[in-house]
Image (spheres, rainbow, N blue to C red):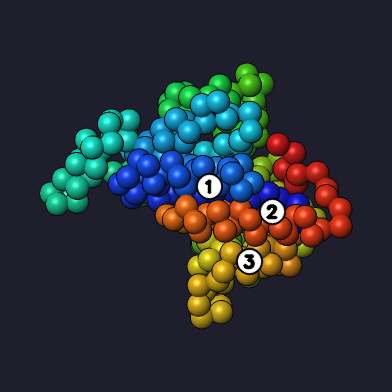
Amino acid sequence: MLGGPILGLGRMHRIFSGGVRRRILEAALDTGIAAFDVAPCYGEGMAERELGHFLQGRRSQCLVFTKFGIPFAPIGDLPSPVFFFLRALGAITRLPVGANYRIRDFSLPALRKSVTASLRRLRTSYIDCLFIHEPLVFPDSKELADIMTALDLLVKEGLIRRYGVTLGPDHVRQEASVTSLPSRLVVMAPVCDAVIEWCKHPALANRIVAYDLVTYLASNNGGVPTPEEVVAFCRTSLPGASPIVASRHAARVASYGRAFSDNKKALPTQEPHAHGF
């Protein structure tokens, strides 16, 4: 398997204990998962902030993937007790305290503002890969060209190293459009039959970050897969892809790390990382 595993932190903000959150991150890095996927809107900034604290003294060992484009109120920047109180208050009163997933803002000012805030929360000077966060409609060529011009400038400035686009379930059905995406875009998408086929396509090979593996395998196999089954699936069905795994339990995260590590040791040769990070 060419792509290394990535720990998804999309539900980090639902873990009340700071100690548990840190143990999850430590379990990942200790067992060989050194890439982390976040977004500013995950926990309204909390996931990035938590990862930023963890990265101190470890940044050179880790890869950081984050995103931009979904508006939110940055209550995740507040102390954790205040954050959880406001989220609970919003749930009770239905006040708009969370991210607004029905809106996207991919404007150039919003891009620059988002990257600046992410770098501050992550306590880093650069992002390894920045994703356009799940456009509501498949991005047309002009919209992409404008955004990519701005992203290329961020690369030149050293603020990001690579960039890509996160696609939702509806987008993956547009295979003809997906395969024509510019070759410098990394493509993040949920695992499905179409994504498995993408891994065989010359235009997309080694550019795919795949998520929702457990959901896909559970729906097809009728039960929650073991970490070893997830790794075996990645090796056989997602060659060259970088899989995102996630759990609220440090022991499960460590099991993923060990399974990927054991699989890597079993391979006869080791090729360079698919995405060249």
Query: Percent x, y for residue 130?
Result: 57, 36
Height in image: 165 above or below 130?
Answer: below
- Residue receiving disc 2: 261
Quarter of the picture holding the C terminus: top right
Give how far across and how far down residue 127 sits, in percent: 58, 30
Residue shown at the point (56%, 21%) measured from the top left: 125
Q: Real-space Cα distance between discs 2 and 3?
A: 11 Å
**Label 3, on which residue?**
228
Could you say whether the residue bearing mark 1 is in a helix, strand or loop?
helix
The kind of residue on which mark 1 rests is: Ala
Q: What numbered label is drawn on residue 84?
A: none
Residue reaching furthest left? 93
> Label 1, on which residue?
27
Looking at this view, is 203 or 41 the one in front?
41
Q: CA distance from mark 1 to mark 2?
A: 13 Å
Q: Percent from the top left, x then y, of residue 52?
A: 47, 31
Residue lying at the far right in this picture: please name it: 268
